[in-house]
Amino acid sequence: MKKKVVLAFSGGLDTSFCVIYLKEQGYDVYTAIANTGGFSETELVKIEERAYQLGAVKHVTLDVTQEYYEKSIRYMIFGNVLRNGTYPISVSSERIFQAMAIINYAKEINADCVAHGSTGAGNDQVRFDLTFDVLAPEIEILTPTRDMCLTREYEIDFLKKHGVHFDFKKMEYSINKGLWGTSIGGKETLKSEQTLPEEAYPSQITAKGEETLELEFVRGELCAVNGVVYDNKVEAIRQVEAIAGKFGIGRDMHIGDTIIGIKGRVGFEAAAPIVIINAHKMLEKHTLTKWQQYWKDQLGTWYGMFLHEAQYLEPVMRDIETFLQSSQQNVNGKVIVKLRPYSYQLVGVESSFDLMKTDFGEYGEVNRAWTSDDVKGFTKILGNQMKIFYNVQKRNEK
């Protein structure tokens, strides 16, 4: 009896290769795509058709979009998570939820093995392996692309020899599309001195001129776009992407340290994440205290680091999430954004929790809560420790 393997399948080059290769090795291949919100129904149908064309015994689509938002994206918004101040951790975060969905499906159908198409030079191999091993240590992990050290050129030739005629030109880039952004790797991203050409981006710029976008947040969550209220926060994110994406906003090149210790580059487009995170951060500047912002920045950075390093299942992540959610009680209000081709401008906020709108005074203008003598006394006490330090230095002739 043939062994049953569940392959994490995207329909791309690596996983297309894996279907045929694993079949040749004597496995019954069950393909599963865990959709984190990046695929339309039409695209999912095409991926299913491709899986069967390649010889899959069965194909399933596992929709984890809502779970991905509830258990990850909203905390990344709360924490204003941008790795190296640039990248909204699109692929890093969604891979964990894809891996959890795949391994749960493998257990459900009593699979002997689970497989993925990650190479040996990136982060995804660790994210898949670690999640599979923690949640189902009894299931064997197969990784043909990594184990055989395959190049993209080898895989393309292999598929051609097996009569597979996909659009190989498009496959020159590895494109990972999800609700929280799209990453593009290959060709120019492998060279430090090059960047992606316009045609490499899945979305093309169609907007001209300027457009105003209004985002409304309730307890830190995006709840309305241009006055339209969304009970389903996933749909709110999609609406921002539809509006801001046509301006080519959120495109950049992320350069960072991989889990395995080497430097890596990846292009990305993430209009909605970039605009939402920065609008949310601006609202927080108006509604949170100095120390709330300070400590939230520290924990937000750590939360992003753990997500990137495949540590989502680490219990401390639940502790950080509790803090982040608690910090959002007063993050309520509207943010006005101006959109232009390739750029955006945060105009301002409207919030009843705005700490600038108080009876205590206006910065640089007038104070109403203290006198001149109050400031003189405060300044004297504030400088006490420094005065003592320099007095001791002088006494010791330093």
Image: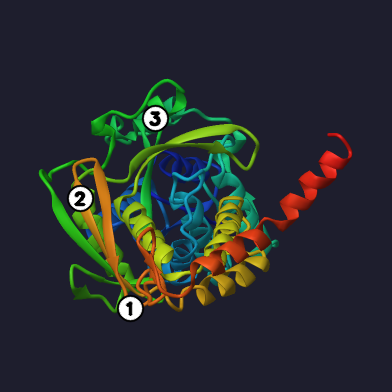
> What residue lies at 26% left-to-right and 50% top-to-bottom?
345
* SS assignment at label 3: helix
Mark 2 and mark 1: Cα distance apart in space = 25 Å
**Horizontal relation, residue 61 to residue 94: left or right:** left
Kindly check if marks 1 and 3 are in contact, taking CB atoms under 8 A apart as contact: no
Mark sitting earlier along the chain (2/1): 2
104 vs 6: above or below: below
Q: Nearer the viewer, residue 214 or 253?
A: 214
Label annotation for residue 219: none
The residue to which callout 1 is attached is 352
Q: CA distance from mark 2 to mark 3?
A: 40 Å
Q: Residue at x 39, y 22 (%)?
A: 194
Coloring scheme of the render?
Answer: rainbow
Q: Amino acid at mark 3?
A: Ile
Residue 158, x across and y down, in percent: 43, 30
Where does residue 299 sit, x and y in percent of width and height? Answer: 59, 61
Q: Nearer the viewer, residue 379 or 214?
A: 379
Query: Which residue has dot 2 on it?
Result: 339
Q: Nearer the viewer, mark 2 or mark 1?
A: 1
Q: Who is closer to the viewer here, 389 or 186?
A: 389
Where is residue 160, by image quadrant? top left
Is disc 1 placed on a helix, strand or loop? loop
* Identity, as a three-letter code, of the amino acid under mark 1: Ser
Q: Are marks 2 and 1 in contact (CB under 8 Å)?
A: no
Considering only order in the chain, which callout, 3 or 1, is on the residue closer to the N terminus?
A: 3
The quadrant where residue 342 appears: top left
Kind of residue indicated by mark 2: Leu
Check residue 156 in the rendering and tell me which mark sits there, or answer none: 3
**Above or below, comparing residue 304 to residue 352 in the picture:** above
Q: Residue furthest front?
A: 373
Q: How many marks?
A: 3
Quarter of the figure that contains the C terminus = top right
